[in-house]
Image (cartoon, helix red, strand yellow):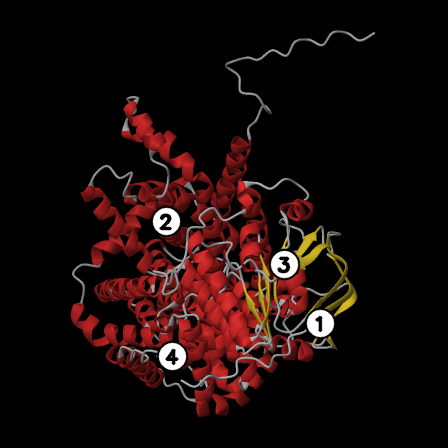
Amino acid sequence: MSERPMTSRSGAIRFHDAGIVYPNGVVGMKDLDLEIQPGEFVVIVGSSGAGKSTLLRAINGLNTLTSGRVEINGEALNTGSTRQLRRVRKNIGMIFQDFRLVKRLSVMSNVLIGRLAHVPAWRSMLGLWPREDREIAADALKRVGITDKAWVKASQLSGGQQQRVGIARALAQQPAIILADEPVASLDPVTTHQIMRDLVRINRELGITTLVNLHFLDLAREYGDRIIGLRFGELVYDGSARTVTDEDFRDIYGRDLTADDVVEDEAVEGGEGGGE
Amino acid sequence: MTAPKPPVSIDPLKRPGPPIGFGTMVTFVIGVLFFGSLAAIGFTPDRLIEVPAGVARVLSFFWPADMAYGWDRVLPAIVESIQIAWIGTIIAAILSLPLALIGSRVLFPRLARGVKLISATARAFPEILLAIYFVPIVGLGAFAGALAIGISSVGMLTKLGAEVVDSLDFGTVEAVEAAGGSRLLALRWAVLPAVLPEIVAHWLFRFELNIRASAVLGVVGAGGVGGVLLNTLRYRHFDKAAAVLILTILVVLLIDMLSGEIRRRIIRS
Amino acid sequence: MIPARPSPNWPLWIGVVGFLAAMTVWSAYGIGFSASELACNIAGGTRLLEESWPPDFGFLPRLAGPMMETVYIAIIGTVVGGILAIPVAVLAARNLTPNRPTWFVDRNFMNILRTLPDLFWAMLFATAVGFGPVAGALALTVFTVAVISKLYSESLESIDMGLPEAIRAAGGNWLQMIQFGALPQAMQQYVSYALYAFELNIRASVVLGLVGAGGIGMILETQRANFEYERVTMIILAVLVAVLIIEEISESIRKRLT
């Protein structure tokens, strides 16, 4: 199959004085100024409740800013406009901790969900996917290495395979940006490394701006280019993954590090493939 | 000034709490309602002796059942009841599916309120009361029955369907919307595939109920086996009535078994 | 390369779709379903609707008595049926029944009770004991047993058998095991089923009168036969209001219990 351009290479993100206060008074984001260049691979760390998800979900409008603004490719996001929201989301793929596959549908159908915004609504309502879109979906499956599972029901896959389908669904959007919200938090250590490697590879091959929320510090250091640390919704660290120190992590977490903050099994190399 | 509090004595044989327990009170209230009702409808002790005698007397006339009449007249009427139930269920399924989807409180908080009102109203009408109206509108017969069954089933199917939708994990809906899909597309691709098996199982279950419902519609002239039973009893042809009962029981048992098996398979898939 | 899409199980699909389509066409034909007839009769229908509006409010006072009778019938049916349903349910619960033959007989008895609709029982009892509310109460008693016993036996099958077995081990007999070990565990479900049956019975008792088994349905039947549709509408409105009120009460009780 021919190499298809998977992205428009235009995934710049910029937060200006952005803030989110939830209706219950919890501060999810505070005075955030942040600029992410197209093609960057950014890992966001912080203890739970630090506002990692809030940040990602503000980029595709699943959360609405209560102050400031966020720009995607220079265009300010207005969550009040359903139309604009859909147009912006079309270019942003999202990967979830709990995979969020439609379990009773085949893997292929799940990946085609990534094409919904690209296909006329009447066609997708009837399931009459254009040939081109089916090829894009197949290509996305190939990139995560589970083409052989294309017609299997999503419920019959293992956790790692399901997350690959989740990645393929995001890829099928041919996005400029991928947001991965704790993509490995429900996976075992072996699969965790495989999925992280997939994400890095896709970022390198396709130049898709990738933001990954991670809980584990060793993963952040190993796979991140740039690390962003959040604490109570505030940006407390922004720097290269190569120079980040344990001291920095202690500051981000506001406590000493423990064994729970790393993936224990690191003796995993070359486990690429089906993951059965 | 403060007198020492008397020590709290616990009588091991006496249960703590109010002197009359909650259970006793409920029993008492139900008892009063029950005996009051008995007196109000004139159910005196002498009736108590009369009733079993009457039942026994009628039952003794039931045997032997006139099965020739059963095959000739009753079976076609039962078949008509099944047809009424089938068409009624199909009407209800078609009308209730979209209502159930937009009746989800989570996905459509505003629309859901309206849908709930519609379904509550539809449920409040027993089929037979609707049939009373449909018979003069579309004429005596099975068609009126099917419409009545269809309309009155919409309420329950909508309610159950909306409950299935609301029990869903809405993460997939968010995933579709995050990919730029509209709410409608989320219904089609995230909600429908997840809920359809349960909803179809509910349709089948309603079909089982509708067979029983359609069996009685004949009482108001809306076709089916109910009219046959009413006539045989009215003219005291107990052997023929027995044939109606035997065949109805057999057919309903058979359909319940088949339908139940299919439902189990659908849910398991 | 992506594998070819596995071809669906065509014989199964064609069989299912064909069966559904055939069943629908056959049924529609059998009951004389016709859109044209519906369209033609709509005119007559609107006339009927005009005749049935406004409801005859003057008729309302005459409904109070029969309406109360309807409630009485439902109460009696629920109480007697609810009590009788307990032994039927216990014997039909796989884990509590004393032996297999009893279980088998009781279970089939239960299923047969369930096959016959409420109005059939009403017709039978009206014939046996004469027209009137007593026949209605008896019919609803049977109907209640059918509804509650099935649900309750399923609840009983899912109780924790530790306590009943402990009672057995401590030398209790079968009856004591049921009374102290099994029934209390499913008490809450039982109450909620009983209330559910009461709601069904209120609905059912409204129409029992159509076959002469007492309650408000008897008036409904006379007015319908005389084409007094303003009165029919009045009765139906009254019934709806009553049913909704009683369901509301029943539901709030059920909510408080769970």
Instruction: Residue type at mark 3: give it.
Output: Ser
Instruction: Residue type at mark 2: give it.
Output: Val
Residues at marks 4 and 1 on the same chain:
no
Give the residue displayed 36% in from the left and 75% down from the top: B86
Task: Quote the CA–CA distance across marks 1 and 2.
Answer: 56 Å
Circle 4 residue: B142
Which chain does the residue under circle 4 lie in? Answer: B
Question: How many residues crowd mark 4 within 10 Å: few (<14), some (14–19), many (20+)?
Answer: many
Q: Nearer the viewer, mark 3 or mark 2?
A: 3
Residue A130 appears in the picture as rendered? no
Q: Secondary structure at mark 3?
A: helix
Which of the two discs, 1 and 3, labels the residue nearer the N terminus? 3
Which chain does the residue under circle 3 lie in? Answer: A
Give the residue displayed 39% in from the left and 78% down from the top: B87
Q: Nearer the viewer, mark 4 or mark 1?
A: 1
Which chain does the residue under circle 1 lie in? Answer: A
Circle 1 residue: A79
Q: Nearer the viewer, mark 1 or mark 3?
A: 3
Q: Secondary structure at mark 2?
A: helix
Q: Position of residue C79 (x, y in %)?
A: 44, 44
Residues at marks 4 and 2 on the same chain:
no
Q: Nearer the viewer, mark 4 or mark 3?
A: 3
Task: Quote the CA–CA distance across marks 4 and 1.
Answer: 54 Å
What numbered label is drawn on residue C145?
2
Residues at marks 1 and 2 on the same chain:
no
